[in-house]
């Protein structure tokens, strides 16, 4: 496989200052990735919500960097999660759609995840929370590779998709292949407790670790502990529940951060907090004024909270407007620990170490999104520098935005800037052709042409 597209994209900084140590000086720090589910860019006090209280996100931002243009790799959850683990855009790695129903999409055994690679050099690995990289039928069938085998985790506790019947007293957690049974707790605090149990009682403290904490909140069906909804006496009904649900999530994040502090490992831990996609407005979620919501490739569907803390390497309280994406986590982690990137496949993300150093970042492959909902609703987007092109599913209709200046995507420049539009179209087509050349395109073409009744995974 050869990837012929090469686009160098220098990106400028605003309002940011970092200190940095070279990879030669790094002694295998711990890696913690915390992910919210359906949390919008505007769903926190940290990112400007006037009501929602998120003191632990505020604390993390004050101790690290807040990215104002952080992205998920897709407008829906399964694809964006697969991209975090593999560094590869979802249509390339096989998880091209939301994993519900019967279809061929899944995280393929041929994909390489960063926990797998770090485990090979002595890291201990753990995943707690949502998984959603298999269909429900396969997740419940022990004959199929589960979280440990798929993702590269020594220890895991997960649900296939949502917490059921809701965030309150979920019944569908599986721990290392065995059902947990009904839990008398709310999902995010329970997931945090499991992570803390692993940190303090299970792992080998002589080894560095990888910890993935993928919360369910604020994905529906939402249930909120009254102690969090009562934080919002002026809100009523759905708003109080949703606002409290974000605070419930924030509380759980704080529990993880506190455990790292108590265990004495915070100073040697890179922790990233983000979301898998944009919000669901009907549930009370906010895009912070961005155009679009979950399932859209306008900014509201893909621009998400993105906080990074790494003491001694990132200046506390920094704010950065460099565009970054969940796909970058793979390359960043590998460079930090000194593992070469795989050379037998395309890696779409880039290392963020130059960004942490206050330098520009170059992207050989543009930021690219294709979010599948149905053929009528699919949308394709690509960003290079300040410029973003948005296309319909057929890639015959195009919008052009300067998203650095027009962050709400109100001013379509496609007609007034035909040369720039044609340039972006050409690169978009070339990028998509290379993805199709490498990805299992027969899967999505088969589903677009007709429903795939009885489809099974082909590992």
Image (cartoon, grey):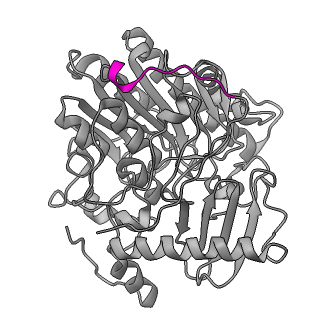
- SS assignment for the magenta stretch, majority: loop
Q: Residue at x 32, y 68 (%)?
A: 2
**313 relative position to 174: left or right:** right
The residue at the far left in this view is 143
Q: Can you tell which quarter of the image residue 4 is in?
A: bottom left
Frontmost residue, 9 versus 252: 9
Q: Is residue 39 magenta?
A: no
Please report the bounds of the magenta region as a residue range. Answer: 16-26
**Which residue is located at x 57 percent, y 60 percent?**
75
**Image height of 312 relative to 223, above or below:** above
Residue 176 point in image, percent of width and height: 21, 41
Question: Can you give x and y, in whole percent of width and height, for residue 356 in the image?
Answer: 53, 30
Q: Nearer the viewer, residue 182 or 108?
A: 108
Q: Position of residue 48 (x, y in %)?
A: 77, 35
Name the residue: 62% across, 60% down.
383
Q: Is residue 20 magenta?
A: yes
Task: Classify the position of the N terminus by image quarter.
Answer: bottom left
Is there any visible trace of residue 103 in the rendered image?
no
Q: Is residue 338 left or right of residue 279?
A: left
**Dividing the picture into quarters, in which one does residue 24 lie?**
top left
Residue 13 lies, in percent from the top left, at 68, 36
Count of numbered tags: 0
């Amino acid at each position: 496989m050869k990837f012929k597209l090469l686009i160098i994209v220098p990106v400028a900084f605003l309002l940011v200052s970092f200190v940095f140590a070279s990879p030669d000086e790094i002694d295998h720090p711990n890696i913690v990735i915390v992910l919210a589910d359906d949390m919008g860019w505007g769903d926190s006090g940290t990112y400007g919500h006037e009501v929602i209280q998120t003191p632990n996100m505020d604390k993390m931002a004050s101790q690290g960097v807040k990215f104002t243009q952080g992205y998920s790799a897709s407008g829906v959850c399964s694809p964006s999660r697969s991209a975090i683990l593999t560094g590869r855009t979802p249509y390339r790695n096989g998880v091209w759609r939301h994993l519900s129903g019967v279809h061929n999409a899944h995280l393929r055994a041929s994909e390489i995840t960063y926990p797998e690679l770090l485990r090979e050099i002595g890291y201990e690995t753990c995943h707690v929370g949502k998984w959603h990289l298999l269909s429900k039928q396969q997740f419940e069938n022990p004959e199929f590779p589960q979280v440990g085998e798929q993702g590269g985790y020594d220890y895991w506790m997960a649900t296939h998709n949502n917490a059921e019947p809701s965030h309150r007293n979920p019944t569908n957690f599986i721990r290392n292949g065995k059902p947990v049974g009904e839990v008398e707790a709310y999902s995010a605090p329970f997931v945090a407790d499991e992570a803390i149990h692993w940190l303090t009682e299970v792992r080998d403290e002589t080894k560095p670790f990888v910890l993935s904490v993928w919360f369910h909140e604020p994905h529906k069906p939402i249930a909120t502990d009254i102690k969090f909804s009562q934080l919002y006496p002026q809100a009523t009904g759905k708003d109080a529940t949703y606002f409290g649900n974000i605070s419930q999530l924030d509380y759980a994040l704080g529990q993880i951060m506190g455990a790292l502090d108590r265990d004495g490992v915070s100073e040697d831990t890179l922790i990233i907090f983000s979301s898998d996609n944009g919000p669901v407005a009907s549930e009370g979620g906010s895009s912070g004024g961005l155009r679009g919501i979950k399932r859209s490739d306008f900014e509201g569907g893909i621009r998400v909270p993105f906080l990074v803390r790494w003491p001694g390497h990132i200046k506390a309280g920094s704010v950065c407007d460099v565009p970054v994406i969940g796909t970058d986590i793979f390359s960043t982690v590998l460079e930090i620990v000194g593992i070469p990137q795989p050379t037998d496949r395309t890696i779409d993300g880039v290392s963020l170490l130059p960004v942490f150093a206050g330098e520009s970042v170059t992207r050989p492959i543009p930021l690219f999104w294709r979010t599948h909902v149905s053929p009528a609703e699919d949308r394709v987007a690509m960003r290079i520098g300040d410029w973003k092109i948005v296309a319909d599913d057929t890639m015959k209709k195009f919008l052009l935005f300067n998203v650095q200046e027009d962050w709400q995507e109100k001013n379509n420049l496609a007609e007034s800037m035909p040369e720039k539009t044609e340039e972006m179209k050409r690169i978009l087509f070339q990028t998509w052709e290379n993805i199709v050349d490498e990805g299992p395109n027969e899967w999505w073409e088969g589903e677009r042409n007709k429903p795939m009744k009885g489809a099974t995974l082909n590992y």
